[in-house]
Image: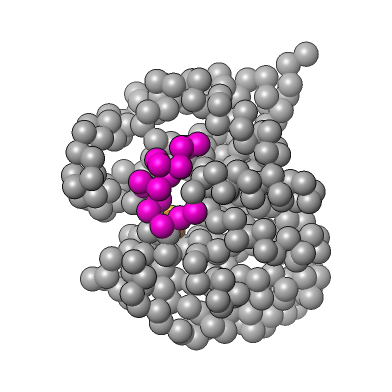
Amino acid sequence: MLTKINETKAKTILTKTNLPGCDYVVNPYNGCQFACMYCYAAQIARWKHPNEEWGSFLDVKINSPELLKIDLEKLEKKFKSKNFGIIWFSSVTDPYTGLEIKYQLTRKCLQVLVDFGYQGQVALQTKSSLITRDIDLLKKLHDVSVGFTVTTLDDKVSRFLEVEAPPVSDRIKAIKMLSDNNIHTYAFIGPLLPHFVNSKAEINRLLDTLQEAGITEVWFEHINLSSKIKARLFEYLKNESPDLIPEFEKADNQEYRDQLNKVIFDCLEGRNLKLGLDRVIYHHDLLPEKLKEKKYFKVKK
Ligand code: SF4
């Protein structure tokens, strides 16, 4: 699907953010080869490519590692510290999008963070087992957390909506490998697909599988069906599986979200799992002051 690769030079790479759960973001690429049909970044990261299909272009910021070194040194001077909070890879791409095999920009940025001796947390979120290539560097970071987006346990479903992303079975194996290397892993279960509301058993099976693989933290997010995302997703569904459109439409209201929240909290009860942001995220109603609070779900005695 990828037809256009643009090697570019960015002006800055470590960007301050208001996104919940992190302080700075690093995006070594603009665009994402995984081409997920529900991708929010498809709407915000394509301003240079208004007429191109999401997944068909990739801007490769070839100077990312050099810039990161410069940005880290500037912030060290400003804060007189090597800890400026959580640095997250990535907000508008997957840091292990396919061409990371060739360009290794995420790997080189991790090397920069290791060499710099960054003392804050480095968090990475991906759908790709390619991250296991970098276990050597992840282990050298002071504080690291690796998240895998998992929306289903079914490879066919993941391939249907996450068109070019590695299958979910690969991600589960990668979680296990990272956990076996004592690297903190979490699962990002989002967007929550509509069928979950009627299937407590399926959420439990998903959580069981993820915990067996080694995760200790889980994040949930309701589906974001803002107009642009909906237009792209529904156009795809119209051609591929129109019977699913009413199911997604049903998922776009508060009553549905309340019902699903209840199912999820029931499933979390009794599990030793930390819930990211202490809530099921819904993009419309994030409240920054509440986002830093975290609670833990303890095992019932
Ligand atoms: S992996 Fe993430 S950034 Fe890439 S297309 Fe999918 S949702 Fe978008």
Q: Nearer the viewer, residue 290 or 207?
A: 207
User: Going by the picture, which residue comes out furthest to the top?
Assistant: 301
Position of residue 254 in the picture relative to residue 110 (left or right): left
Asked if the magenta segment contains residue 155, the reply would be yes
Q: Nearer the viewer, residue 301 or 257?
A: 301
At horizontal 55% and vertical 63% (from top left) the residue drawn is 96
Position of residue 273 measured from the top left corner of the image (x, y, whole percent): 68, 31
Ligand 1 located in image quadrant: bottom left
The reply to whether residue 214 is in sight is yes
- Against 256, residue 187 (above or below) is below
Position of residue 272 measured from the top left corner of the image (x, y, whole percent): 71, 28
The image quadrant that residue 198 belongs to is top left
Q: Nearer the viewer, residue 224 or 37?
A: 37
| Boundaries of the magenta span | 152-166
* Numbered circles on residues, count: 0
Position of residue 253 measured from the top left corner of the image (x, y, whole percent): 31, 30
At horizontal 55% and vertical 19% (from top left) the residue drawn is 266
At horizontal 50% and vertical 36% (from top left) the residue drawn is 153
At horizontal 23% and vertical 40% (from top left) the residue drawn is 241
- Against 138, residue 288 (above or below) is above
